[in-house]
Amino acid sequence: MSEEKMAKGDVTWFQHDRFGMFIHWGLYAMAARHEWVKQYEQIPDDVYDSKYFKHFDPDLYDPEVWADAAAGAGMKYFVITTKHHEGFCLWDSKLTDYKAPNTPAGRDLLRPMVEAFRSRGLRVGFYHSLIDWHHPHFVIDNVHSMRNHPDRDKLNENRDQRKYIEYLHGQVRELLTQFGKIDIMFYDFSYPARNEKGELDNRLGKSRYDWDSETLLRMTRELQPGILINDRLDLLDVEGGWDYRTPEQWLPREGVTVGGQPVVWETCQTFSGSWGYHRDEATWKSVDQLVRMLIEVVSKGGNLILNVGPTARGEFDDRAMDRLRGIGEWMRRHSRSIYGCGPAPADVPKPDNCLLTYNPTSRRLYVHVLAWPVQHLHLDGLAGRVEYAQLLNDGSEVLMKGLEPWQEAGYEGAKRDTLTLTLPIQKPNVVVPVIELFLK
Ligand code: GLC
């Protein structure tokens, strides 16, 4: 890397918007049993392609419907798999024949998607796989679908990873020059491994050298100034080597810190476990869980990108639509506690059964009540600091009033700095009720 510091991406919008949609769509939607199916089942190219590449025909694909679903759920950006590990490309790349226009789909599927989402004001991100189980020069390693091929070593003799690097960089150049402004580049992923001598070995795993990550990073920033780049290029130790961390399918207990300093982060999450469309998975999260997850993430200062795996016919299936609608229903009335928000000020302790978010610009504190208490909610550290309180779902006043002195006489327990709110007996009919507090 050169001496001068590599510019970093602009995280301002990202930390404001907080909520995005991930989309994993490729040939694996047809197998409908995980996007890693080619690798899990060690399916040879000819078998994979004679089934899936040959028959991929998403005749119901309408990106306007997808974009409406994302916008309706309150999502502000989306990240689409331009190419996943299977190597299949959604756009009309000049560098390969292994692309949507050469399947029965017969056209570029990416461009209309980018246009549809952009037209609804969503920002655009590309997920691009560093790994490629189709490209003839990608050196077969221990993660490859052909890892157990009897002629693996022989096949590798004719593979030149540098040619793959050229292809990878060329395709990224296409993606970053032919689709207008791109806000996020999500590279996936590096898994360096060493041999007995302790040397990095690209037949075992793939490191920054197998992608020439530093050149790729520099090119990405040059072609799209301000773009955000995730943390999977194996450049965690390089200045400007990443903009945000990406805990995958888990939630950090607090925020994410590096060297004791909080950093920008986004957790990526699925509805049911797999990223690609999975017909038979029975592990779908409920709307309730998903809304709570979004709140929890923002309360810890992170972003949530929630994944949809569209079907091979080109639709979001009913289970996904149901979740998106449910989230949207909550977001319609409560997005004020999400957008522009982050963790509560350090001197406000977390009340029992609640999650807090805070908007420092409007100075409003949001109390998400996860278990509706009987009558009173006690908020330590807030006595005298709140100007007005209301329920967010209907804008109705919440009285800042605790127990009567005669009720408390003879009992102990109330704290001096506690603000007590009197709540309606009935929990508002929303997934998670929110109380909006206007701080003085
Ligand atoms: C992983 C998986 C993958 C998925 C991704 C999303 O690294 O390989 O299938 O695309 O994470 O974060």
Image (spheres, grey):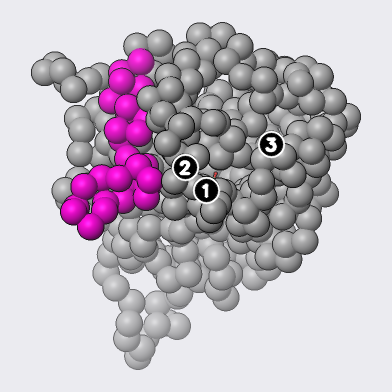
The residue identified by callout 1 is 151
Q: Which residue shows up at 15% across the image and 18% down it?
A: 2
- Between the residue at mark 3 and the residue at mark 1, the CA separation in whole angstroms equals 28 Å
- Between the residue at mark 2 and the residue at mark 3, the CA separation in whole angstroms equals 30 Å
Residue 342: numbered disc = none
What amino acid is found at the position of numbered circle 3 in the picture?
Gly
- Between the residue at mark 1 and the residue at mark 2, the CA separation in whole angstroms equals 5 Å
Quadrant where the N terminus sits is top left
Quadrant where the C terminus sits is top left
Q: Nearer the viewer, residue 2 or 111?
A: 2
* Number of marks present in the image shown: 3
> Which label sits in the foreground, 2 or 3?
2
The residue identified by callout 3 is 26
Q: Can you say whether 437 is above or below 81 in the image?
A: below
Q: Position of residue 219 (x, y in %)?
A: 35, 15
Q: Can you say whether 233 is above or below 98 in the image?
A: below
Q: Residues within 10 Å of mark 1 (few under 14, many from 20)?
A: few
Q: Position of residue 37 (x, y in %)?
A: 65, 52
Q: Which residue shows up at 30% across the image and 45% down it?
A: 201
**Could you tell me if the residues under marks 1 and 2 are in contact, i.e. CB atoms within 8 Å?**
yes
The overriding secondary structure of the stretch rendered in magenta is loop
Is residue 256 visible to us here?
Answer: no
Toward which corner of the image does residue 228 lie, by quadrant? Answer: top left
Q: Position of residue 253 (x, y in %)?
A: 36, 62
Q: Which residue shows up at 56% across the image and 9% down it?
A: 178
Q: Which residues are magenta?
A: 192-219
Of the image marks 2 and 3, the number of the one nearer the N terminus: 3
